[in-house]
Amino acid sequence: MNNMESIIERFYETLSEKISLTYNKELFSVFDNMPRPIINFNDVELLKKAQLYVRHTDLVFNKVISKMVKELFEYKGIKAGTPSDRNGKCVFVYPLKTSFHFLSIEKFAGFPHVPWIKEFASSGSKGNSINDIYIVLIKSDNYGKDYVKKLNCNSNTEEQKFFIFEDFIVTMFGDKAWTLISNALYRVQKDAEELQWFELAKTSNPKNIKEFNESLKKEIENFDYYAELEKTSIRIDRNSFNNIGNRFLSDKLYLRLFDYTDYSKSFLTSEWLYKNTMKNDLLEKTYVITGYLKSVEQLLYTTISRLETNHKISILDRNGIKEVSLDSPDFLKATLGNMVHFLKNFENRDIYHSGISRMSITGISLIIGKWVQSERNGYFHKHNMNDIEKVQEIRNNTLLLYYLILGSLGK
């Protein structure tokens, strides 16, 4: 192992050990619209009630990074040190006469709303040298670059004072150094997730729910339904699929997911749990998928019961198979299997939108039937659910089913 690899491996080992002793999961963005930190140890506002951990981890994180950067400069043959009056949170590079300060993203939370940010950006922290520059520990994406640009615009000097961590590392030490550091940060994140020992639950209230719903609407509008269809290996012709999409998306039938009917409540409850509580832990995950599976059954019941058709549905009662109308009180006895059989029956062709081909009707009913057998029946009756990837698969299947059912049934 060469010196650079050794330096960065020690960085990983030290950071992983020290962070696990303070707190874990996201380091941190206090506001939802803030740039993403280079590594996360807790979520959104969770540590507002644990400020001791914030300060401790912030100090540990900066000190370990500073030590690594100092050693990387020395590896290049450039003398560097970590001044004691900075609590180890900066590196002084002697030939360059420059002090690099390593700043966690939470230092700037709320920009430009924090009143002292302009003063800090223009004059530095507590009379620092004019040669000082600041490395902001955020992701090198569009948000991060725009954020650093704003910081530099508020500076009274023409020289760039603020840099994104990745840009700094690549400029000073090269692409290989950043690749090694990025991998080390990823490993630390995984270590922290396994060691996570506390969490504050995000409660639902009118403001949170409104923001949650708006975000989910955008996700539903941009979801790749055709890619999800291809995973089923069941054919629906492209014209029919596009006609379904026009109804579901362009005619905004997807908004029925947010109308707080029974199926909407079941779906949104699982979405809330999926977004806010899913973890790679040892707990069983059926509590998350229950709402998804239940919501599809409720959606089928509601959609079929509202169809304007004289066709009847077969149900089983104590006297055997019985044909009942969709507006009959007996329709309440219809099982999920009864409804799938009703959708498969081509004599009921007129319940589908006119732009849906015969082949596609067969495909839609096959997808629903396959979902009943592999997902709904399997996980309600036999199997436990421990795999997050399987939960995500069921969620994506649910979105596809909503797309197909709402977009194809009815005039």
Image (spheres, rainbow, N blue to C red):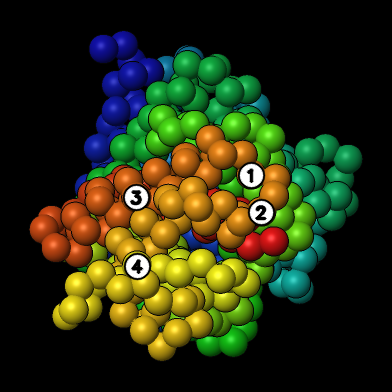
Q: Please tell me how crowded label 2 is: few (under 14), some (14-19), or many (20+) other residues with Cα within 10 Å.
A: some
Asked whether residue 204 appears in the rendered view, the answer is yes
Viewer-proximal residue, 21 or 240? 240
CA distance for labels 3 and 4:
16 Å
Q: Position of residue 286 (x, y in %)?
A: 23, 64
Q: Do the residues labelled 4 and 1 touch (CB within 8 Å)?
A: no
| Mark 4 or 1, nearer chain start | 4
Q: Do the residues labelled 1 and 2 touch (CB within 8 Å)?
A: yes
CA distance for labels 2 and 3:
20 Å
CA distance for labels 1 and 2:
6 Å
Q: In which quarter of the image is the C terminus?
A: bottom right
**Horizontal arrangement in the rendering, residue 117 relative to residue 291 (left or right):** right
| Mark 1 or 3, nearer chain start | 1
In the rendered structure, find residue 356 and report the number of the disc placed on it. Answer: 1
Q: Which amino acid does label 4 sit on?
A: Ser
Q: Is mark 1 on a helix, strand or loop?
A: loop
Residue at 69%, 49% in the rendered image:
354
State the residue position of label 2.
353
In the rendered structure, find residue 314 and report the number of the disc placed on it. Answer: 4
Residue at 33%, 25% in the rendered image:
7
Q: Is mark 2 on a helix, strand or loop?
A: loop
